[in-house]
Image (cartoon, rainbow, N blue to C red):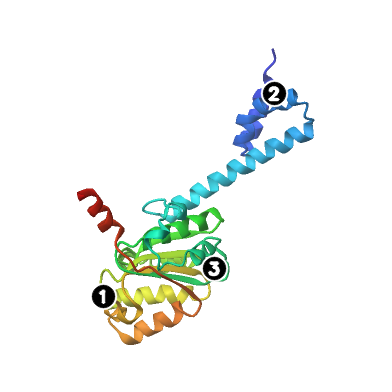
């Protein structure tokens, strides 16, 4: 049997970067022949498989690039445990139209109420919608920016951060920022103003953010930009971790 056409076909499909065509064409041909499908229907199915697999790989790459500490969806969030959280608004935000409009989201509440889970869930939804996402904590972001100054990479890093469709800054308020750190964070927020969406989680109400930034003037300027187009998620309730600890001891 002359297998030269098959070898050439595999070579061409590899060059054309159609891996799903390459792995599925023979099996699908047998299925379509058994079902009496014509060549157009066969090609249509093959193209659909390639597109589905390509989209899956692209989503995987976006999730990896986002640098999530964990992959969590909103489906696994216990909304009943945090009755103060507006579930309807949260699920509306998961459609990611807020990112298309360059609006921000701020989740406020005590430690352990699931703010990071919500941020991760919205970030995952954004990746699935085809958006470029970057996740970081406030402390890690400031550390990265300060290191970039020392390495003369600040402008490059700022450009990368500004280019994201969605920037998620977790745990704002856990660690007070230095004067330099606060100014660097303000610069990122200012550069992204009306250019790209930001999600921020914080354990502090707005009137205590001065404790983080160390300056009323700077805090005012940051809040002015963040809250101009914003959706606020109130997440007051008992800590999930504390509740689980009680259950374990019971």
Callout 1–callout 2 Cβ contact below 8 Å: no
Choose the circle earlier in sequence order: 1 or 2.
Answer: 2
Cα separation between marks 3 and 1: 31 Å
Name which quarter of the figure residue 147 lies in. bottom left
Choose the circle earlier in sequence order: 3 or 1.
Answer: 3
Residue linked to disc 3? 98
Callout 2–callout 3 Cβ contact below 8 Å: no
Residue linked to disc 2? 30
Label 3 secondary element: helix
Query: What is the x, y in percent for residue 74?
Result: 46, 55
Which circle marks residue 243 in the picture? none
- Of residues 249 and 75, the one nearer the viewer is 249
Residue linked to disc 1? 178
Query: What is the x, y in percent for residue 57?
Result: 53, 44
User: Which corner quadrant holds the N terminus?
Assistant: top right
Callout 3–callout 1 Cβ contact below 8 Å: no
Q: Is 192 located above or below residue 224 in the figure?
A: above
Q: Residue furthest left?
A: 249
């Amino acid at each position: 049997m002359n297998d030269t056409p098959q070898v050439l076909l595999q070579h061409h499909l590899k060059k054309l970067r159609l891996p799903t065509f390459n792995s599925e064409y023979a099996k699908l041909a047998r299925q379509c022949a058994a079902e009496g499908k014509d060549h157009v229907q066969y090609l249509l199915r093959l193209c659909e498989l390639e597109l589905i697999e390509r989209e899956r790989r692209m989503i995987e790459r976006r999730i990896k690039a986002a640098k999530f500490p964990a992959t969590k969806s909103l489906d696994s969030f216990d909304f009943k445990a945090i009755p103060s959280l507006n579930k309807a608004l949260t699920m509306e935000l998961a459609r990611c139209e807020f990112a298309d409009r360059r609006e921000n989201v701020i989740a406020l509440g005590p430690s352990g109420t699931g703010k990071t889970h919500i941020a991760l869930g919205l970030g995952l939804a954004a990746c699935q919608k085809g958006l470029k996402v970057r996740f970081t904590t406030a402390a890690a972001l400031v550390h990265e920016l300060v290191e970039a100054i020392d390495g003369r990479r600040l402008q490059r890093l700022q450009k990368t951060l500004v280019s994201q469709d969605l920037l998620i800054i977790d745990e704002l308020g856990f660690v007070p920022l230095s004067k330099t750190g606060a100014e660097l964070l303000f610069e990122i927020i200012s550069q992204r103003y009306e250019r790209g969406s930001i999600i921020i989680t914080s354990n502090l109400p707005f009137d205590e953010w001065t404790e983080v930034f160390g300056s009323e003037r700077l805090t005012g300027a940051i809040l002015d930009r963040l809250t101009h187009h914003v959706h606020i998620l109130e997440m007051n309730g008992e800590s999930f971790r504390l509740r689980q600890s009680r259950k374990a001891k019971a």
